[in-house]
Image: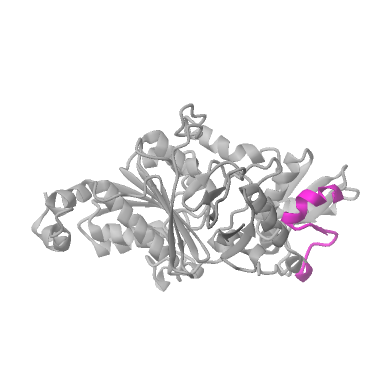
């Protein structure tokens, strides 16, 4: 039942026959989990709170940084250093005291994903790591929970909606991610208003799915180019060989999901900067250091003795890496080097490592005088 | 036969930032080869050593998803290269 105050607050919803009293009561009864209180999670949370989602939760283990504020509109400058999930709860509770807001100040991972997601009716994915996206998708499929997914990069966004038994899941579209180089906002930059567009769209999709109105993005992949202001829609179908929602799924538990994301890179040694420093200091260590950044990045600054083979040239230049040495791949932030290591592993090499976190991590922990060139 | 090819932002470093380019071919394989000759290294980011479409990349002819690189292209077909994005 809606109170008198709620009837007034949501009166413009109640005027819409497609929502009305019944739809608003459905929203009040709904429980929605937002993964990531970041650029996408901010507008999604604000609109869902305003719309009267009865129980809204955010899971995020990060603290608010100054560089977040150009797009993460849940937060103010005074919030710097505060946990995102907690600050978001305070902001949303102030915006709409009629709803309940939960803050989960943890990293969503294999240990807690099932327990957390099982408590909610619908999930919004606004995370900024591909492994988390696959984990969220797989757990939603396993638990039969609808998922509204979106992602952003520079000036481009994409979105899709999964509803159990009605259409394909995220993994039907992109079967696997492990080892691929897919930059996030921290490494590639993003126009601040872009997640406002995509995050608002996620809130819209959530309301449609929950109330059963309209035509959600099921089996439809929406892309947005902010510079050209171009929306495009692509049709895609459930894959019978999908690892999680297919006819013979290989992912039946959350542990299977984690294993699927890690299997391709299991043979690759991940070196912390201190470990690489120690390795480089060992007399007679048989290693080849391969910097897979672009030539302009390499020429600006690089580790002594490193060989520059840009990632795109690696397949035809793999033979330049001395065969009896450990191949240690490095790049700016660890994405390209992991992709390079995976290529080396697939080409039949053994003794492969990459620098976790890349030269940015090296500069932050081992050599603070080392200046890492920007991407472009 | 030249076709408009739309490039996802993670691969635009190969096209000097351009969101679209043109490439020739009667099939996706031919089109990708032409794309790579104009933008060296780009093709390897789309297909792997076994000539399979990478699992974080999808190719669409107009709005239709294609899984085979042998898919034929008709006049005025547009090819869309879609890349999984991770930013949030």
x then y, percent, for residue B18: 59, 68
- Identify the residue at image location x=52%, y=32%: A256
Q: Is residue A290 left or right of residue B38?
A: right
A47 falls in the magenta region: no
> Which sits in the foreground, A189 or A69?
A189
x then y, percent, for residue A201: 35, 58
The stretch of residues the image draws in magenta is A299-321
Indicate whether A73 appears above or below A162: below
Q: Is residue A279 visible to the viewer in this orientation of the structure?
A: no
- Identify the residue at image location x=47%, y=67%: A68
Q: Quick one: which residue is furthest to the right in this view?
A: A284
Q: Quick one: which residue is furthest to the top in this view?
A: A248
> Which sits in the foreground, B3 or A232?
B3
x then y, percent, for residue A275: 74, 50
Q: Quick one: which residue is furthest to the bottom in this view?
A: A77
x then y, percent, for residue A53: 25, 53
Q: Is residue A194 visible to the viewer in this orientation of the structure?
A: yes
């Amino acid at each position: 039942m809606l109170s008198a105050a709620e009837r007034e607050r949501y009166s413009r919803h109640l005027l819409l026959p497609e929502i009305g009293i019944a739809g608003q009561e459905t929203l009040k009864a709904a429980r929605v989990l937002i993964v990531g209180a970041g650029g996408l999670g901010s507008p999604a949370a604000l609109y869902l709170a305003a719309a009267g989602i009865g129980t809204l939760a955010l899971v995020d283990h990060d603290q608010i940084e100054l560089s977040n504020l150009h797009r993460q509109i849940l937060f103010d400058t005074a919030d710097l250093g505060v946990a995102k999930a907690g600050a978001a709860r305070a902001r949303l509770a102030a915006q709409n005291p009629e709803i309940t807001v939960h803050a989960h100040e943890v990293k969503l991972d294999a240990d807690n994903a099932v327990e957390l997601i099982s408590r909610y009716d619908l999930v919004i994915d606004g995370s900024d790591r591909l492994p988390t996206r696959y984990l969220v998708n797989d757990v939603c499929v396993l638990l039969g929970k609808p998922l509204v997914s979106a992602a952003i990069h520079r000036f481009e966004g994409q979105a899709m909606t999964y509803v159990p038994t009605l259409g394909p899941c995220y993994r039907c579209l992109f079967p696997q991610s492990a080892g691929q180089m897919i930059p996030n906002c921290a490494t590639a930059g993003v126009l601040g208003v872009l997640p406002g567009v995509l995050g608002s769209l996620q809130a819209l999709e959530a309301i449609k799915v929950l109330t059963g109105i309209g035509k959600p993005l099921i089996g439809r992949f929406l892309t947005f180019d902010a510079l050209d202001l171009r929306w495009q829609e692509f049709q895609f179908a459930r894959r019978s060989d999908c690892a999680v929602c297919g006819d013979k799924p290989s992912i039946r538990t959350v542990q299977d999901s984690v294993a699927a994301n890690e299997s391709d890179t299991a043979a690759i040694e991940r070196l912390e900067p201190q470990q690489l420093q120690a390795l480089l200091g060992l007399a007679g260590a048989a290693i080849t250091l391969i910097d897979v950044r672009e030539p302009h990045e390499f020429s600006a600054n690089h580790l002594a003795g490193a060989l520059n083979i840009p990632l795109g040239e690696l397949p035809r230049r793999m033979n330049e890496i001395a065969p009896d040495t450990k191949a240690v791949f490095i790049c700016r932030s660890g994405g390209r080097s992991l992709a390079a290591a995976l290529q080396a592993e697939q080409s039949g090499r053994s003794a492969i490592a990459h620098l976790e976190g890349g030269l940015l991590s090296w500069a932050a922990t081992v050599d603070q005088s080392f200046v890492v060139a920007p991407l472009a | 036969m030249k076709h408009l090819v739309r490039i996802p932002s993670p691969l635009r470093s190969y096209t000097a930032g351009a969101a679209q380019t043109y490439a020739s071919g009667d099939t996706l394989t031919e089109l990708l080869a032409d794309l790579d000759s104009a933008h060296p290294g780009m093709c390897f980011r789309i297909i792997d050593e076994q000539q399979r479409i990478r699992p974080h990349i999808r190719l669409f002819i107009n709005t239709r998803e294609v899984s085979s690189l042998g898919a034929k292209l008709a006049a005025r077909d547009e090819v869309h290269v879609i890349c999984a994005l991770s930013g949030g």
